[in-house]
Amino acid sequence: MEDLLGVPAQTGYNWLEAVAERGPVALGDAPKSGRPSRLSADQWMELTATLHASPSEAGYGTPAWSPELLRSHIFDTYGSEYSHAHMHRLLEKAGLSRQTARPSHYKVDPAEKQRWRDEFKKVVGAEG
């Protein structure tokens, strides 16, 4: 069985047993049980709406949501504590992505900056 399926024999037997008990769907992408969410469905909807607004609207003095700020907000609002890594998953689940501003000096002339970029662009096929 190891040569045929490329997995240990016991894994193959486990698959056969699962199919015998629950049918072919047992090996598919059926929903899997897991730890229940600490937030209710209503709390998640409220949190998602809050995340799609500016943190300043929620009373924070920052321009964007960060994992640290979200973690603090969830603890203060709902009394639930999550890991820092899970905050990235919650932000993604809410449809947000982690973006940071690219700093630019306030005295930079945009036209001069573009001229400099155009001058130093790589030329396709140029030897060097």
Image (spheres, grey):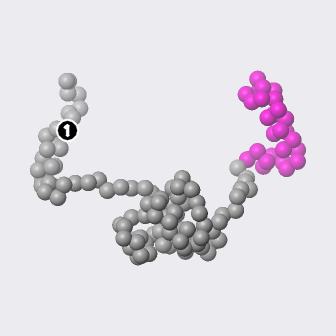
Above or below, 84 relative to 57: above
Q: Evaluate whether residue 16 shows in this view.
A: yes
Disc 1 is placed on an element classified as loop
Q: Nearer the viewer, residue 53 or 123?
A: 53
Above or below, comparing residue 78 to residue 37 in the picture: below
Q: Which residue occupies 47% across, 68% down? A: 51
* Residue that appears at 73% across and 47% down: 28
At 43% from the left edge and 64% from the top edge, which residue is drawn? 65
Depth check: 70 or 5 in front? 70
Quickly name the residue at label 1.
121
Q: Quadrant of residue 33?
A: bottom right
Range of the magenta residues?
A: 1-28
Number of labels in the image equals 1
Q: Type of residue at label 1? A: Lys
* Horizontal arrangement in the rendering, residue 124 relative to residue 33 (left or right): left
Q: Is residue 9 magenta?
A: yes
Q: Is residue 35 left or right of residue 101?
A: right
